[in-house]
Amino acid sequence: MLDPYKIRKEFPILEQLVHGKQLVYLDNAATTQKPKCVIETISDAYCTINSNVHRGIHHLSQVATERFEEAREKVRSFINAQNRHEIIFTRGTTESINLVATSFDNTFLNEGDEIIISTMEHHSNIVPWQMLQERLGVVLRVIPLNSDLSLNIDAYKALFNEKTRLVSITHVSNVLGITNPIKECIDIAHSNNVPILIDGAQSTPHIAVDVQELDADFFVFSGHKLYAPTGIGVLYGKEQFLNAMQPYHGGGEMIQTVRFEKTTYNELPYKFEAGTPDYIGAIALGRAIDFINEIGLTEIAKHEQALTKYTVERLKEIPGMRIFGSPNGAAISFLVGNIHPADMGTLLDHLGIAIRTGHHCAQPLIDYLNIPGTVRASFAIYNTTEEADILVEGIKRVSRMFE
Ligand code: PMP
C-alpha cells in the first residue's frame, strides 16, 4: 500500500506552516507540488548539461538533446503511444488544444462544420473552438448532462450528423471529479467516423492511460498537474492526423529548408515544436514520470479514490452540505448552506487549508448548476485521511461562524 507519510517527505513545500498552522494542501487539481527528485533534476540539468538542443555538434548540446529525446520516450511509454514522434511537447493542455484547433482548422474544417464538446469542459476546451467559430463559422454542439451530472450519452449520440468533424471532451471533470466513460465516448465518435480529442489534464495524474487501447486520436495533458514543473505539457496525436495538419507556429526547428521563395517543414514531432523548446522542463517531466512509475498508478489510484470516498462520507456529516455529482476521481466540489465559496475559502485558508473556490475555469458548468461557484478539495499522492479530517473539522468550524 502507498504510504502518503513516506511520500510527503519528498515534498519540501508541505513542511511549512501557513498562518501558523500546518499546511494542508488540497488544491492539487490546480497544480501539484514538486518532489525533491524533480526539483533536483531541474537544478542538475542547469548545472551540468544546459545547452540548446538539436542544433549543436558540441558535447553539451548533444547530451541535452539526448536527455530531451529520452524524456519524449518516457512520455510515449507513460501513455503507451505507438510512436515517439507522435509526442509533441507544448506549454500545457491549453496550448495543446489551441494547437489542434488552429492546425486542424487549416486542414479539416469549413464554415458550417460542427465540433462537439460537453457542458463540463474547462475554458481551455471551449474558447479555442469558439475562436474557430468566430474565424471560420464552425458550429459548437454541446453534450448536456444527466441529473447526476454525468454526461448524457444518448444526447451525445444524437449530436452527430454529416457535418460533425471533431469531438473534444474531458476525461475527468476538474470541477466535479467525475471520470467520464471515455472509451465509450471514443467508440461512439469513431462509429460516426469522427476523430476525438481527450483532455487528460485531470486524468493523467491519477489513473493509467493507454492511448492505443483507448484509440484516442488526440490526447493532451499538463506537466504541472503531474508533479512536473509549469510550462511543459504534451500533445499526443495519431501520426496520420499530425502529418496532415499544418504547423502551428513558424520559426526555427520546425523547418527543413527556408528560402524566400519557399519553405519546407520538418518531420514529426519537430514540425510542431518551433523555437527553443523547454527541454529542461521536458527532462523534469520525464523525472516526474519516473517518480510516478516508481510508486505505480494502480497504487496511486487506489489511494486517491479511497481518500475521496472517505472525504465524501465525512463531508456528508456537515449540515447543509451539498456535493455536486458523484466524484470518483480525486476532486470534490461542494457548497455548505448559503456560505459563499469565497468566504469558505478565505476562512479555511486562515486554518492553513488550501482549497480552491469559484468557477474553476468552467463557467458554463457553474451557470448550468445555477450557483456562484463551488469549494473544491482535490487530492494527490501525498494527502492523508488526517488531512481530510482537518478539512472536515475546518468546514464545521466555519459553518458554525455563519449560524
Ligand atoms: N483542462 C482541464 C480539465 C483542467 O483541469 C485544466 C487546468 N485546470 C486545463 C484544461 C488547463 O490546463 P493548463 O492551465 O495547464 O493548460
Image (spheres, grey):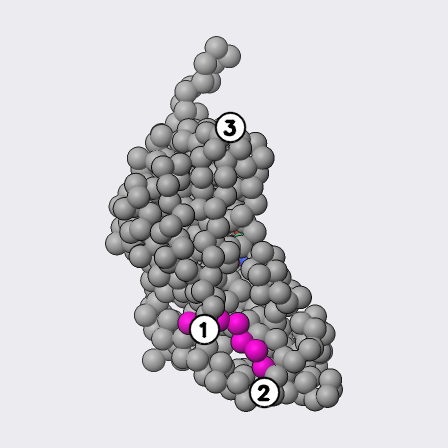
Q: Are marks 2 and 1 in contact (CB under 8 Å)?
A: no
Question: Can you see residue 398?
Answer: yes
Mark 1: few/some/many CA within 10 Å (<14, 14-19, 20+): some
Outermost residue on the top side: it is 261
Mark 2: few/some/many CA within 10 Å (<14, 14-19, 20+): some
Measure the alpha-carbon separation of dots 3 and 1: 44 Å
Does the beta carbon at disc 2 come under 8 Å from ligand 1? no
Image location of residue 51, percent across then percent down: 49, 40
On the image, which quarter does residue 19 sit in? Answer: bottom right
Image location of residue 172, percent across then percent down: 44, 61
Q: Identify the residue shown where x is 53% and y is 48%.
A: 126
Q: Identify the residue shown where x is 63% and y is 87%.
A: 396
The amino acid marked with disc number 2 is Ile
The amino acid marked with disc number 3 is Gly
**First-in-chain label (2 vs 3):** 3
Residue at numbered disc 1: 326
> As displayed, is residue 5 above or below residue 12?
below
Q: Identify the residue shown where x is 40% and y is 36%.
A: 163
On the image, which quarter does residue 192 sit in? Answer: top left
Q: Are marks 3 and 1 in contact (CB under 8 Å)?
A: no
Image location of residue 398, percent across then percent down: 69, 84
Which quarter of the image is occupied by the C terminus? bottom right
Q: Judging from the image, what secondary structure is the residue with disc 2 in?
A: loop
